[in-house]
């Protein structure tokens, strides 16, 4: 019987298992020896067993084995008695790495490493387990073999058996899990996020030490508390307080739940909580949540400051827009009212530009730290003030241009100028904004120069407006460019194209109207601006004897073509 031992033998040891060190040579029996073993030696034994091998065969005949698990049985002297089909298949497909001189013709000697194990099993009467690498069909696999004693009815060890199990996949799985755990630990140390766990009653059971670095509160003091016990849960920044039950009772994942904390200096810290529910793997019972908290204070403060500035600018712009709308309505009644409107807008623009230029100047002085070193945050604020002021100044200039154009008092100084120089000047004014959006402007260039008859400053203004719109309405990593097309012997068309959001057909005429953008109204616009740039550009182009035409496909891009008159010599050459 397998593993049986005589309990009456003096000094007998308890049956056990022993793992020997990794052997120098593998324990696999060479194919030549395996092929010598008959597959029928243990069948139909009618006579009483007399030899050890007969006894072993008798035992084998009364037992059944899983043929897929490699198994061998050998006498304690090293004579191979039995191998199953699983063992034959393993030996047939593996590469033998033992000593070649251990196999002699006519002998049935086993590998030295296996012989050592047989002696170990015989002496200790214990199972011996070995882990070894076996190369199967050219691929190294990890096998665990268990070698066990086989005893006769008197308890004497008469043979040793061994089975082999491939556990390569288990090792790889354990290695992968270990790698994933190490990755998680590395990520947790490197990130600014903090991690938490709560039980089914929403009480804190674990919080990572990162939270203490943020708030200054030892995390051990938070154990057993709910989120609302040490912070404020809100739906919105200005919204009402809520309890964690409102978003945890659903037992489903959640993201970006606003959670306000305070540090040791009582400063508000804005965080986003995200978590997933935990369920018992065997019963499916709800156990709580695990998740992370992200410090988003910088984002929220920047958003609040931006909203405040945006509201201020929108209020100013709304006032200006309302004034112009009122003046437009009055202009329909009389020419006198029309002139009064333009004078009012010009005066208003002048009165706004004067203090606005002062604000921009003081902000620039703060940025340059002219009067002494400033806190970096104040320098950052000065940049915001400068950007907002310059944006507002551009809006005011647009409004003033419209007033001058419609009053008919604009003066154009036309001359023959280089088209390439005009475009290059315009590109220099928009290249920074294009780079901020990672736009490809490699095709914004003039390959063949033309001389056009225009007011140079106004021509540059037209291209600045068109290129600015292309940058504004083209998504990040998009593309804009310029294409030259002669229209006739006396005119040339310069097309500014982009891969932006495009303009619907029913908006093509409307985009050249005052205060109009491709969006429905001023309150739904996602892009800044008054909607005067195209109106001014088309008016200027027509004043100089040309025009602007539009082609656009929604979600594919737009093409604005400006038509200019060529100077006399270039007309003759064409």
Image: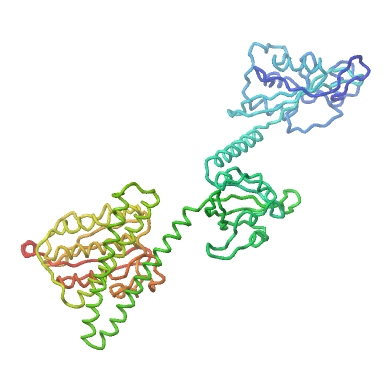
Residue 478, image x, y percentages = 35, 56
The quadrant in which the N terminus is found is: top right
Left or right: residue 21 compared with residue 547: right
Question: Which residue is rendered at x = 55% and y = 54% of the image?
Answer: 272
In the figure, 44 relative to 564: above or below?
Answer: above
Looking at the rendering, which quadrant does residue 188 occupy? top right
Between 34 and 538, the one lying in front of the other is 538
Residue 495, image x, y percentages = 23, 63
Check the image and tell me how it is coloured: rainbow
Left or right: residue 316 compared with residue 8: left
The quadrant in which the C terminus is found is: bottom left
Left or right: residue 78 compared with residue 136: right
Left or right: residue 11 compared with residue 459: right
Between 441 and 320, the one lying in front of the other is 320
Between 507 and 113, the one lying in front of the other is 507
Residue 425, image x, y percentages = 20, 56
In the figure, 168 relative to 427: above or below?
Answer: above
């Amino acid at each position: 019987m397998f593993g049986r031992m005589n309990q009456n033998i003096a000094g007998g040891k308890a049956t056990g298992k022993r793992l020997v060190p990794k052997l120098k040579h593998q324990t696999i029996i060479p194919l030549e020896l395996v092929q010598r073993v008959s597959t029928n030696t243990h069948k139909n034994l009618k006579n009483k067993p007399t030899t050890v091998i007969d006894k072993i065969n008798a035992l084998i005949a009364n037992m059944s084995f899983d043929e897929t698990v490699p198994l061998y049985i050998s006498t304690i002297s090293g004579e191979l008695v039995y191998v199953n089909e699983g063992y034959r298949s393993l030996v047939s497909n593996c590469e033998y790495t033992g000593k070649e001189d251990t196999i002699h013709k006519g002998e049935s000697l086993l590998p030295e490493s296996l012989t050592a194990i047989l002696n170990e099993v015989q002496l200790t009467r214990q199972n011996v387990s070995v882990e070894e690498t076996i190369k199967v069909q050219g691929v190294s696999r990890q096998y665990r073999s268990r070698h066990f004693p086989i005893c006769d009815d008197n308890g004497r060890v008469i043979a040793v058996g061994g089975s082999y199990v491939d556990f390569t996949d288990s090792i790889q799985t354990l290695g992968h899990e270990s790698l994933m755990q190490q990755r998680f630990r590395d990520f947790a140390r490197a990130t600014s996020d903090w991690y938490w766990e709560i039980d089914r009653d929403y009480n804190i059971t674990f919080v990572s030490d990162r939270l203490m670095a943020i708030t200054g509160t030892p995390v051990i003091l938070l154990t057993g508390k709910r989120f609302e016990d040490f912070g404020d849960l809100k739906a919105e920044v200005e919204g009402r307080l809520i309890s964690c039950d409102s978003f945890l009772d659903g037992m489903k994942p959640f993201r970006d739940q606003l959670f306000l904390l305070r540090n040791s200096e009582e400063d508000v810290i804005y965080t986003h909580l995200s978590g997933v529910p935990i369920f018992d793997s065997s019963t499916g019972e709800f156990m709580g949540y695990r998740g992370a908290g992200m410090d988003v204070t910088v984002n929220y403060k920047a958003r609040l400051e931006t909203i405040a500035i945006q509201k201020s600018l929108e209020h100013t712009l709304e006032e200006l827009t309302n004034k112009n709308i009122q003046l437009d309505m009055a202009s329909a009644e009389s020419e006198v009212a029309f002139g009064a409107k333009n004078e009012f807008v010009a005066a208003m623009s002048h009165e706004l530009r004067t203090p606005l230029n002062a604000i921009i100047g003081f902000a620039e002085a703060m940025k340059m730290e002219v009067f002494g070193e400033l806190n970096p945050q104040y320098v950052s604020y000065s940049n915001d003030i400068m950007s907002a002021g310059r944006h507002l100044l551009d809006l005011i200039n647009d409004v003033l241009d419209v007033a001058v154009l419609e009053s008919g008092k604009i003066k154009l100084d036309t001359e023959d100028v280089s088209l390439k120089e005009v475009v290059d000047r315009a590109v220099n004014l928009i290249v920074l904004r294009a780079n901020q959006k990672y736009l490809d402007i490699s095709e914004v260039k003039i390959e063949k120069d033309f001389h056009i008859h225009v007011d140079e400053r106004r021509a540059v203004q037209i291209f600045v407006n068109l290129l600015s719109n292309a940058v504004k309405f083209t998504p990040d990593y998009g593309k804009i460019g310029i294409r030259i097309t002669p229209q006739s012997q006396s005119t040339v068309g310069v097309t500014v194209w982009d891969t932006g959001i495009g303009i619907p057909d029913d908006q093509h005429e409307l985009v050249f109207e005052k205060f109009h953008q491709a969006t429905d109204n001023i309150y739904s616009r996602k892009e800044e601006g008054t909607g005067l740039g195209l109106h001014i550009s088309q008016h200027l182009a027509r004043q100089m004897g040309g025009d602007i035409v539009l082609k656009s496909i929604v979600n594919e891009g737009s093409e604005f073509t400006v038509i200019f008159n060529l100077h006399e010599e270039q007309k003759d050459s064409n």
